[in-house]
Amino acid sequence: MKKRTLFISLLLVLILTVLTPATAVAVKPQPFYAAGTIVDIEDTVIDDNVFEAGDSGRWRVVDREIAGVLSGDVNGEFILTYKANIESAMTQAGNLHGNLVVEGYNFKANGRIQPLEFVPVQLFNGVYYLPKLTISGHWSMKGAGQNGEFSGWVIFIPDAAGHVDTIVASSFVMEGEWKTDGDFMSPD
């Protein structure tokens, strides 16, 4: 009786293995890499989207966009829509949370805006010290094993209020892992 039960169990396992569709088999995460540039940061306007957080000296950014272009495992224009809690208007440092959309994929983003620094840049007929804004953090997508790190920076000519006016140099990089089977790689 035990041999018969064992034989039937092994037969069922073999049949189920053959009949199981390929999409039910676990897909292992694959390396992910995309790099590009930041081409625009939405103008700062003190309104319902950007305002002082009481008398704390901090600022709240409710909705702001960073736009750019990526190539690699995803290709095309991206928009990082984020909210932030900024420690000081002078340093622009703080935490950011949002969504990065590119090629129909929606990446959740959580990170940090580093304090502004001034870097030498050769422009026109001389060297100028311009502000550099740096962001970095973690991204994830729906489904296990789809996550990684992002980093970006822009060197810019500020407007009269000190906000980003003209971007003169930039970079944006995403690295990590994702599942490359279309049934598992979710734009959601």
Image (tube, grey):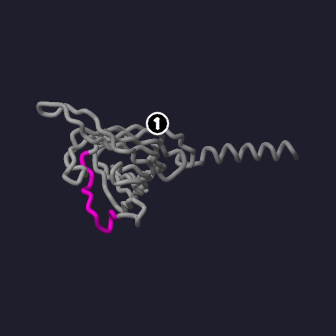
Residue extending furthest toward the right: 1
Asked if the stretch drawn in magenta spans residue 72, the answer is no
Residue 17 spot, x, y in % from top left: 63, 44
Residue extending furthest toward the bottom: 48
Quadrant in which the C terminus is drawn: bottom left
Image quadrant assignment for residue 132 = top left
Query: What residue is rendered at 56% in x and 49% in y?
Result: 24
Query: What residue is rendered at 26% in x and 55% in y?
Result: 42
Q: Which residues fall within the magenta stretch?
A: 39-51
Asked if the stretch drawn in magenta spans residue 44, the answer is yes
**Most foreground residue, 99 or 85:** 85
Residue 187 located left or right of residue 68: right
Main structural element of the magenta stretch: helix, strand or loop?
A: loop
Query: What residue is rendered at 37% in x and 39% in y?
Result: 173
Count of marks placed on residues:
1
Residue annotated with mark 1? 31
Q: What residue type is labelled 1?
A: Pro
Q: How crowded is mark 1: few (under 14 residues within 10 Å), some or many (20 or more)?
A: some
**Most foreground residue, 38 or 148:** 38
Residue 184 located left or right of residue 134: right
Element type at marker 1?
A: strand
Residue 74 located left or right of residue 22: left
Residue 8 spot, x, y in % from top left: 76, 46
